[in-house]
């Protein structure tokens, strides 16, 4: 990814050992998968998640994202109410699940041509 950004919407081909595979390449760490492109995301866990860390999601053109799939890491973790409220105010519904479940859900929705985005926290997979 040039400058930690790859234009266009891409299927996530794999998630392993704290990283992701997409568009024939790999990235170690968390990512945002947006309609405008895939980018590195400096969020290591749900405690670091705030509206500032989701600024790129909120900057997408209105109506481009109907559902944001949040991969919360190795386990399911709650989304803070303030973040859910900010996303809902922007017309974006949110579904939170462990990242190893979030990635295939995102891929299915993308395959159905839904207006979906993903915010995926990379973490070691549960044993």
Image (cartoon, rainbow, N blue to C red):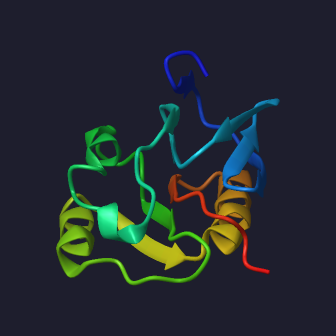
Q: Residue at x 39, y 69 (%)?
A: 46
Depth order, front residue of 122/13: 122
Frontmost residue, 124 versus 21:
124
Residue 28 at x, y percent in the picture = 64, 41
Give above or below for 49 relative to 84. above
**Left or right, 69 with reference to 87:** right
Q: In the image, residue 33 lies at what x, y percent?
A: 54, 44
Reply above or below: 68 against 37.
Answer: below
Query: From the viewer's perspective, is residue 33 above or below residue 17?
Result: above
User: Residue at the spot x=44%, y=43% of the render?
Assistant: 41
Q: Is 10 left, or right, of 23 in this rendering?
A: left
Q: Residue at x 22, y 80 (%)?
A: 81
Rendered-image quadrant of the N terminus: top right
- Residue 71 in the image: state x and y as whole percent: 54, 67
Residue 79: image x %, image y %? Answer: 34, 77
Query: Which residue is the extreme one toward the top?
Result: 2
- The vertical placement of 20 against 70, above or below, is above
Apparent side of residue 18 relative to residue 96 in the rendered image (left or right): right
Quarter of the picture containing the C terminus is bottom right
Q: Which residue occupies the foreground of this view, 24 or 111?
A: 24
How many labels, in total? 0
């Amino acid at each position: 990814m040039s400058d930690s950004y790859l234009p266009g919407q891409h299927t996530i081909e794999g998630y392993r050992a704290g990283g992701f595979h997409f568009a024939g390449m790999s990235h170690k760490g968390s990512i945002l998968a947006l309609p405008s492109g895939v980018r590195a995301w400096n969020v290591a866990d749900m405690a670091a998640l705030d509206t500032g860390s989701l600024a790129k999601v909120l900057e997408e053109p209105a109506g481009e994202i109907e559902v944001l799939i949040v991969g919360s890491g190795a386990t399911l973790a709650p989304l803070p109410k303030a973040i859910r409220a900010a996303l809902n105010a922007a017309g974006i519904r949110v579904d939170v699940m462990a990242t190893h479940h979030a990635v295939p859900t995102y891929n299915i929705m993308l395959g159905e041509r839904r207006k979906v985005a993903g915010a995926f926290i990379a973490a070691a997979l549960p044993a």
